Amino acid sequence: MLSEKNFNLNLKKLPIHVLVCTVILFQSLTGKAQSNKKDSLEYKFQRLESTNKFNPSDTTHINLLVQLGKSYRYLDIDSVYSISKRVFEYSEAVDYSYGKINGLRGMGSYYYEKGRREKAMPLYKDALYLAEETEDYVSEISILNVLAQNASFEGNYAEALNLNLKGIDIARKVNELEALSILNENIASLYADQKDFKNALMFYDTVQKINRTLGNEIVDAETQSNMATLYKDAKDFKNAMFNINRSINTFEKHEIIDWLAYAYEVKGDIYLDQQKYKWALYWFDQSNQLFKHQIDDDRVKIQLMNGLAKAYLGLESDSLSYKYAQEGLDLSKKIKSIQGQIDCSETLYKLHKKNNHDTEALAFLESFKMLSDSLSKDKSKQSLSLLETKLQYEQEKQELIKANQQALAKQRNYIYFSVIILLILSIITFVIRRSENIQKKLNKELKEKSIAVAEREVQLNEINSTKTKLFSIIGHDLRGPIGALQSMLKMFTDGDITKDEFLSFIPKLKSDVENISFTLNNLLSWGQNQMNGVVTKPKRISLSYIVINNIQLLSEIAKSKSIKIINQLPDNPRIWADNNQIDIVVRNLLSNAIKFTPENGLITIDAKEKENVWEISIRDTGVGMNEEMQKKIFESSSNVTTYGTNNEKGTGLGLSLCKEMILKNNGNIWVESVVRKGTTFYFTIPKAEKRYQKAS
């Protein structure tokens, strides 16, 4: 397989007895197909070796060995190594690049599956170098895919994203649609691992379009398996079950054993998340049977072992639960899988805690927490790395395109120069005129290059500003409240404060968490805008609905300062805009009004109908602002951040984010303010066209 996919699915619900019969039937057939393929290839090769026609220098024989090695990929990894080593030795003797590439890849796969990635990666990289050197684009794409999967497995999402993007460029160049499907799906999995379901589904939409063009139901079933996992993680069990059932039908139909084992395991996970332990155990057992007899893939096996352990725990079978959890933990340590160790340690902690084994439970709890904290920190860093990598990759790509264009321009100039030399020998006057034209052209090119350099400098400054601001916000505005929360919890757990004292801090902690959530929402929206990742999708929406929801959302904060919020909107004004973006604008402006309005103040929300737009105003009786601050507050490069009347702290992102959102929706935003009297923010949004419905 080209990809090493990792996901879940959903299928139309069949009657349970039909589904069970289907599984039993295919369980007797699926092992036969994969084994038959391997046995057939092995028989052909042994027969060839036993005759005097066998010649290890013949590339036909080497290619047969390559196919044989691939057939062992999920059946016997030790055989893969011995076959791949022979492929490499035979190919090196006759300098056969394709054979050397596949020999190196096969040996790399062996070490990779054994958890010895320090030995696997140099082999893969040597294979990649050979593929690039010989312009073997198909092999190059495949190796980039494996390297990207390894980077993702190790938590290096920035490197994984970079490798997948390179693979996509090559796949587009040679029109490899299946590779495009796989590589886009890999990127979707990176976003899914960050719990960014919106972006993950956006990439899956691209994958499914490609799959429809391919018309390959097996490739489509692989994608459905992975989408099922995504929906499961998002707690959308209906869609998860729909996709996994469709993929299982396809894998059973075509006897794709390795994917079928994975799909059974995913279906067990879906039932497990719904606490349907008997059904979860049934599907885990189906997957385990395939793993026992026909598949050797430790990574998926770890997930399966922990799934079985959790299912048995739910069914009160503690001894079996302990057996599978311990097997999964041992295997995770063997191949150095941090996520596997986290999952299995958590299950073992719950087991020991349930049975009052306090010492063992504490040991597994500490291990689970230590690994989880480490992985969580890494994922936070990698979220920023994904943003930086995408910006950097796009910039490097544009630079390469420009360099290619400049090289072509130089070649054209050489041709022009040769023509000029010939013309100089024949007509002096023409040479003079030609020289003048060349001079003009050179001046124009110089001017264009100067403009390009200036534009590139602006882009670099914007990227540096984005990165600096992101780290500044995270370092100062988020670390402080989180640190305070952490200290309070530590004091409570250490016994430095009583339960009553701790409970007295709950309102303050709730306020801090709400502020952190609000800041993170603004930060995510702003960061996506900076890398042009937000797509505005206008539609007919109710302004009243948005305003009322946000008044309810912020009512507790307003009540704590005895601030009265008056909604003077006309009867249900309809606007044409992106619902989420306008929701962010109203929430930020209303939050700002509460922040800078003293106790017993008044906030008024109004809207006036103009010719083609609605003009919305949010007026407060707060502290106001001077003219200099009014000029700066909407600038994205500005870090204007002030404290509210109760020392509320902001990120400085809100108003610049509001401006970006309003402009994206074809509106304008401005402010009028008088110091110590109050501030009014205005913005306009296009009106929605009126719709008339025939009475029924």
Image: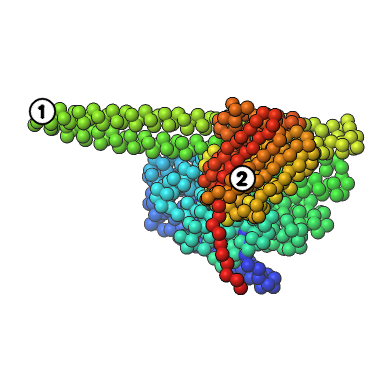
Q: Which residue is mark 2?
A: 616
Relative to 94, is 278 on the left or the right?
Answer: right
Q: Position of residue 673 (x, y in %)?
A: 63, 33
Q: Amino acid at mark 2?
A: Ile
Q: Residue at x 54, y 57 (%)?
A: 689
Q: Residue at x 58, y 52 (%)?
A: 575
Q: Position of residue 150 (x, y in %)?
A: 57, 43
Q: Amino acid at mark 1?
A: Ile
Q: Is residue 465 above or below residue 238?
A: above
Relative to 535, is 562 on the left or the right?
Answer: right
Q: Residue at x 47, y 32 (%)?
A: 459
Q: Secondary structure at mark 1?
A: helix
Q: Quadrant of residue 357?
A: top right
Q: Quadrant of the C terminus?
A: bottom right
Q: Position of residue 131 (x, y in %)?
A: 42, 43
Q: Which residue is mark 1?
A: 428
Question: How many residues crowd mark 1 within 10 Å: few (<14), some (14–19), many (20+)?
Answer: few
Relative to 595, is 169 on the left or the right?
Answer: left
Q: Are marks 1 and 2 in contact (CB under 8 Å)?
A: no
Gap between marks 1 and 2 measured at Cα: 71 Å
Which of the pair 574/534 is nearer the observer? 574
Q: Residue at x 58, y 59 (%)?
A: 224
Q: Position of residue 536 (x, y in %)?
A: 54, 48
Q: Is residue 210 above or below residue 407?
A: below
Q: Is residue 344 visible?
A: no
Which of the pair 177/647 is nearer the observer? 647
